[in-house]
Image: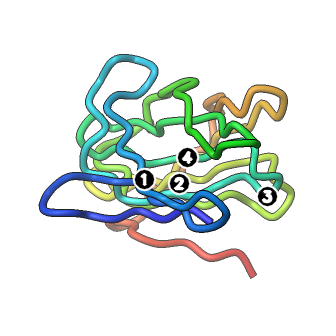
Amino acid sequence: MYWRADNAGKELIARFGRSAGFRRPSSDRCGQSVNGIGEAGAAADGRFVYASNRGYDSIAVFAREPETGRLNAVACPLSGGKTPRFFAIDPSQRFVYVANEDSDTIRMFRVESDKGTLASTDTVVQVGSPVCMVFS
């Protein structure tokens, strides 16, 4: 299990389990600082962990090493809007929906299952300041 934590102003992604501990991703794949994490989540198979990066308006993608749980930066696609507050992985694990709070949009990304990377689609929904989504 991974979760996001704010420890004295330092963004952390924490892990719970066999080798629990805090990990502070210093940068995403584009070399931008990972700051202002709004949401952290993992693919159902546990191979990839995602974090919305409000400081750089992107979604940081990390590959998880199965033996250690270590997170390695893979990619950092732009969120397609401003301030990606939240994202949700759909139940099929084929799409990620990103809620860009300050641009009032939800953008759909396709998950490249072999690499965990996200590919932007043309699907964008205009809404008022989205901050959360739930699949039912």
Which amino acid, by three-letter code, is at mark 1?
Thr
Q: How far separated are the C-alphas under marks 4 and 1?
A: 19 Å
**SS for dot 1:** strand
Which amino acid, by three-letter code, is at mark 3?
Ala
Q: Which residue is mark 3?
A: 44
**SS for dot 2:** strand
Which amino acid, by three-letter code, is at mark 4?
Tyr
Which mark is first along the chain, 3 or 4?
3
Mark toward the viewer: 4 or 2: 4
Q: Which residue is mark 4?
A: 50
Tell me, yes or no, whether the two marked residues, 2 and 1, touch with CB atoms within 8 Å: yes
Which mark is first along the chain, 2 or 4?
4
Q: What coloring was used for the rendering?
A: rainbow
Q: Which residue is mark 1?
A: 105
Residue placed most toward the observer, 97 or 17: 17
Q: Quadrant of residue 75?
A: top right
Q: Which residue is mark 2?
A: 125
Q: How far separated are the C-alphas under marks 3 and 1?
A: 25 Å
Looking at the rendered image, the quarter that the N terminus falls into is bottom right
Mark toward the viewer: 2 or 3: 3
Tell me, yes or no, whether the two marked residues, 2 and 3, touch with CB atoms within 8 Å: no
Q: Quadrant of residue 66?
A: top right
